[in-house]
Image (spheres, rainbow, N blue to C red):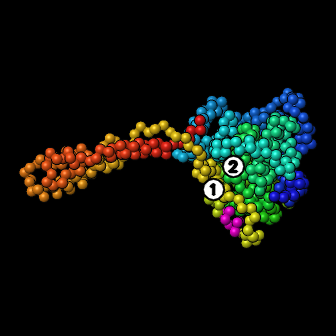
Amino acid sequence: MAKSSGENGPRAPAAGGGLSGTRESLAPGPDAATADELSSLGSDSEANGFAERRIDKFGFIVGSQGAEGAACPLLRRLEEVPLEVLRQRESKWLDMLNNWDKWMAKKHKKIRLRCQKGIPPSLRGRAWQYLSGGKVKLQQNPGKFEELDMSPGDPKWLDVIERDLHRQFPFHEMFVSRGGHGQQDLFRVLKAYTLHRPEEGYCQAQAPIAAVLLMHMPAEQAFWCLVQICEKYLPGYYSEKLEAIQLDGEILFSLLQKVSPVAHKHLSRQKIDPLLYMTEWFMCAFARTLPWSSVLRVWDMFFCEGVKIIFRVGLVLLKHALGSPEKLKACQGQYETIEQLRSLSPKILQEAFLVQEVVELPVTERQIEREHLIQLRRWQETRGELQCRSLPRLHGAKAILDAEPGPRPALQPSPSIRLPPDAPLPGSKAKTKSSKQVQQEQRKQTKASGQLDKPQAPNQATVVTAAGDACPPQGVPPKDLASQDPAPQDSAPRDSALHRSQESLTSQESEDTYL
């Protein structure tokens, strides 16, 4: 599929912050000149000079622009989780991950609450794989990533990807050196995706998404998580015409009217298109907007609950940046408004404040889908049918698991099997009748014989029935009852059929422990 963006490479954004006609037009990373200077190092060994600098707990060089954006260091220190609490959370998450299907089936709300509290850093990468379904994808496609990795790839996309590598978090220790292991893995993941989805190719916004994943997991796992994000969480976002992101921009603007009428009225009066401020937010899942601690907390909730978290974060930022007359005094025109949204207050971006606002904001999947249908109808009336036919997005881990259940190894055999009352017991040689049928036949026998004073016949019938035989016909003496025994050759087939039913039941009652 020919694309002009693949030939010309990434372009700088327009002055207003919007798109300039290509998918590679998102804003470059922070301080491109300094980034080029850092990334010009030829190998990891040449980057050892930067190893003497302090590295924060996320892997960023302390004091650099990329370390935590504009977040306040004091606020970050106040948010440190006590070690004892962290160990308790790790223990709980280990139990969940080792019994994942049980928890997802019966205690999904508890998983959601624990994602809102934050996934322990030591288990975050593993948890993201389970939440996104990337773990299942990897198991269903063994060797697929290696096959794509060994393929040469489309030169058109390889050139664009190579030019984008040094822009992704250049102040992180993993990506600080040009040609280092971080940039090599990033290249492998992005190239593999262009081969996996050649109709989509490569979009510049995928690079920071893949880079964040690589900070938490190996390249193969990061690739399958990227596939899940592009296909399940944000389908159509990275297609050529950017139709899905334009549609979600209209959805965001419509939801803003209910969340913050003041901000909605101001943006309407200024005639500011949602694409001017929400494109990078949504396409990069706020990875290039928020302080890093806030990014990780947002991603924890995003992987669990889906795109509604992205909408909620965007609405919270708009509400607190433009939602009061005092804040609008400095936003007299389009330029001032866009600058206000680019330089958000550190208080709004602070982890605890932002997460609490996002959790409490009443925006649901149903509201988003209802608004999606409304905006899609308007799009079709004004612009015609969508050219990008992407799959419907799935709202979070539960929806993904229900749509694509993973492989399920067999459990241990059950200790017992429950059988219906009229089913033959193991080892029985004939069919038994229910007590009601036995009583009816006894009455018929008694009336026909007219011998109410002879209890032998009912007793004999009862004994025979208890032994698993049917009642004998009238006039057959008791001594001939043995000749009425059913054929013994039926016993073996019944036993084998029961054995097969036990095996079938055991194979059906299985669950995944992912151990």
**Which region of the structure is painted magenta?**
371-377
- What type of secondary structure mainly makes up the magenta span? helix
Element type where label 1 sits in the image: loop
How far apart marks 2 and 1 lie (CA) works out to 21 Å
Residue 335 in the image: above or below residue 49? below
Element type where label 2 sits in the image: helix
Can you identify the residue that label 1 sits on?
364
Q: Is residue 478 left or right of residue 323?
A: left
Q: Quadrant of residue 49?
A: top right
**Residue for point 49% across, 43% down:** 507
Q: Nearer the viewer, residue 458 or 310?
A: 458
Q: Nearer the viewer, mark 2 or mark 1?
A: 2
Residue 411: horizontal and vertical position, in percent? 50, 39
**Residue for point 82% across, 39% down:** 184
**Residue for point 32% across, 41% down:** 427
Q: Quadrant of the N terminus?
A: bottom right
Q: Quadrant of residue 234?
A: bottom right
Residue 130 appears in view: yes
Which amino acid lies under the numbered mark 1 shown in the image of this protein?
Thr
User: Is 373 part of what is drawn in magenta?
Assistant: yes
Residue 96 appears in view: no
Which amino acid lies under the numbered mark 2 shown in the image of this protein?
Gln
Can you identify the residue that label 2 sits on?
228
Q: Residues within 10 Å of mark 2 (few under 14, many from 20)?
A: many
Q: Residue furthest bottom?
A: 381
Q: Residue furthest left?
A: 453
